[in-house]
Amino acid sequence: LGFDRLSLGLQSTFDIHLTYLGRIHGFHDFHRGMEMARKAGFSNISADLIFGFPGLDLKDWNQTLERVLAYTPEHLSCYSLEVEEGTPLAFDLESGHSIPTPDEEDRRMYDLALNCLTKAGYLHYEISSFARPGFESRHNTVYWTLKPYIGLGAGAHSFFNMRRWGNHPAPERYIQALTDGQSPVETESFPLKSDLASEFMFLGLRMLSGIDRTLFASLYGTDPDVYFHGGVQEMVSRGLMEEQGNWIRLSRAGLDLANVCMSRFA
């Protein structure tokens, strides 16, 4: 089967920022990786970037975008920093060694990415994702639209026939289980239909195309506004969602307050 897509976790083009984020690579590693990938024949490469972290300003963020665009990746993901509890970065912020980026500045960086990347010919198809036409992430799109998928290997996750499962994350345990003729599955769950309806909404709203109301009704028995007790119209009245024909999606204002909007359907 093979694979034909690579994703490089660059995060930043400034080594000082990479060090702050706890990364062990430098921008030169990304440069070398892109060169090797192109030489090997890869024509579908994605790069991940992070913004909104302490020490990053609009000038540096703009320069990061311009530097990465020079390598003409087919896909770019731009994520606002999310700090996980218990990490060195969380401790750094809690101790006051670093000052969190104000929400307004974070949103200006997001807006800069939208303008810069769409101007460069990228399609903004998901909250954090941009692609040359035809190079949207197929795996992520399957996940966001709640379609079935099978994961192979240590730590891989799957969703099929209303069942979710995850394999042992340690390669040694995964291989040993298969060698012994045992299942490598470590976790398993059977989500309720109501849980899937919520996931259908808050995952589907990540897509700029939005959600097909007819499809929702065919899966869960009624229109999403009825199912979620007026939630759709509530978000539309607040300017966070918009309706177009049979589709509902986040508005431009809703993209900045996506978590607020999605929580209404949790």
Image: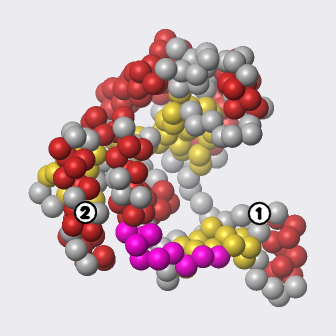
Above-or-below relation of 126 to 199: above
Indicate which label's residue lies in the foreground, 1 or 2: 2
The residue under the point 40% across, 51% down is: 263
Above-or-below relation of 152 to 59: below
List x then y, in percent, for residue 81. Answer: 56, 33
Q: Is residue 83 magenta?
A: no
Q: Looking at the image, can residue 118 be seen?
A: yes
Label 1 SS: loop
**Residue 30 found in image quarter:** top right
**Residue 150 found in image quarter:** bottom right
- Judge left or right: residue 136 versus residue 39: left
Q: In front: 98, or 81?
A: 98
Q: In front: 250, or 23?
A: 250
The residue under the point 27% across, 36% down is: 252
Tag 1: residue type? Pro
Above-or-below relation of 264 to 153: above
Question: For mark 1, does the 10 Å Cα neighbourhood hold few (<14), some (14 to 19), or many (20 or more) residues?
Answer: some
Q: Looking at the image, can residue 152 be seen?
A: no
List x then y, in percent, for residue 111. Answer: 36, 26
- Magenta span: 188-197
The residue under the point 25% across, 78% down is: 221
Quarter of the image with the N terminus in it = bottom right
Q: CA distance from mark 1 to mark 2?
A: 40 Å
Q: Is residue 194 magenta?
A: yes
The residue under the point 44% across, 41% down is: 128
Question: For mark 2, does the 10 Å Cα neighbourhood hold few (<14), some (14 to 19), or many (20 or more) residues?
Answer: few
Give the mark nearer the N terminus: 1 vs 2.
1
Residue identified by numbered label 2: 229
Residue identified by numbered label 1: 169
Label 2 SS: loop
